[in-house]
Image (cartoon, grey):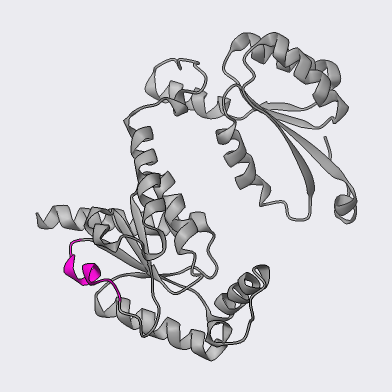
Amino acid sequence: MSLPPPETLHNQEFHLHLVSDSTGETLEAIISAALVQFEGVNVHKHYWPLVRSSMQMERLMEDIREDPGLIMYTIVNPTIRETLERGCMEANLPVLSILDPVINLLGSYFGVEASHQSGRQHVLDTHYFERIDALHFTMAHDDGQLTHDIPLADIVLVGVSRSSKTPTSIYLANKGYKTLNVPFVPSCPMPKELDDNHGKFVIGLTASPDRLAAIRTSRLRSIHESEDGDYTDLDHIQDEIKECRRFCTKRGWPIIDVSRRSIEETAAAIINRYNQWLEAKLEQA
């Protein structure tokens, strides 16, 4: 399937059908990561999760034919796969199994045949319950709540308002890290537990003054609050950032600038620093 000239991309809609025998989260993550490389392309994604029988697959093909496009799937059952592949061939639609190249390469490297069981990544194992526990902890300790529990956290985030503390905390929790975040507000005392627990991993988050001013202004407009005052004043924001940096630097905490980072990139950088911190602790033990 060849793409039209770039000037016509904005006027054409491309259909992506994402078919899975499980929740489809793996497929969605892979496709989302790939689509960022194609700015300006109008893509309509169709999600078809929990496809567990050939009959269900045959009915699904009828829907796909109504909006023909590229089909990508994560299905391990050979009978259902055959039904999908045959249907795509008859409809002359391009189709790709996303995980096959990875599974085949791993099997060749390990010298072991894959089990071909669907949804194995969602088994309710120990790590699953650790993630749920981390999410409960993180939600209960958002925005400076219950700071006496700082010793129980894996990661503590400190930053001025709108420096992405909450979304980053939730993303880290989904990875299994109990995360507590504390807002830095000039002239307001910080929790004493931060200084009482030098053995905890604490990291500061900051952003450019312009970015923070824009985000704060947008936030106030969304809740119909007045934009007057220090909260959106650029000079005041610059002072906030400087004070927060001094506070973190004085305690030897690393600082990450989130201005040009996505939440995923920020979290990856934090996890990398956290692992380095753990390794250093183990070497000292």
Farthest left residue?
285
Q: Nearer the viewer, residue 148 or 214?
A: 148
The stretch drawn in magenta includes residue 117:
no
**Looking at the image, can residue 109 be seen?**
yes
Which residue shows up at 85% across the image and 24% down it? 65
Left/right of residue 204 with respect to residue 152 in the rendered view? right
The location of residue 269, given as percent across then percent down, is 41, 59
Instruction: Answer left or right for 143 relative to 227.
Output: left
Tell me if residue 3 can be seen: no
Say which quadrant the N terminus sits in: top right
In x, y percent, where is residue 242? 41, 85
Q: Nearer the viewer, residue 65 or 106?
A: 65
Q: Which residue range is magenta in the image? A: 190-199
Q: Position of residue 276 (x, y in %)?
A: 27, 57
Q: Position of residue 147 (x, y in %)?
A: 29, 63
Query: Is 250 drawn above or below residue 69 in the view shown?
Result: below
* Residue in the picture at 30% in, 79% down: 189
Given residues 254 and 197, the one toward you in this image is 197
Using the rendered view, name the quadrant where residue 133 is placed: top left
User: Residue 150 falls in which quadrant of the image?
Assistant: bottom left
**In-image side of 65 versus 16 (left or right):** right
Q: Residue at x 39, y 75 (%)?
A: 184
**On screen, residue 178 above or below 79:** below
Q: Quadrant of the C terminus?
A: bottom left
Left or right: 148 as drawn, with respect to 30: left
Q: Is residue 195 magenta?
A: yes
Q: How many numbered discs?
A: 0
Q: Quadrant of residue 70?
A: top right
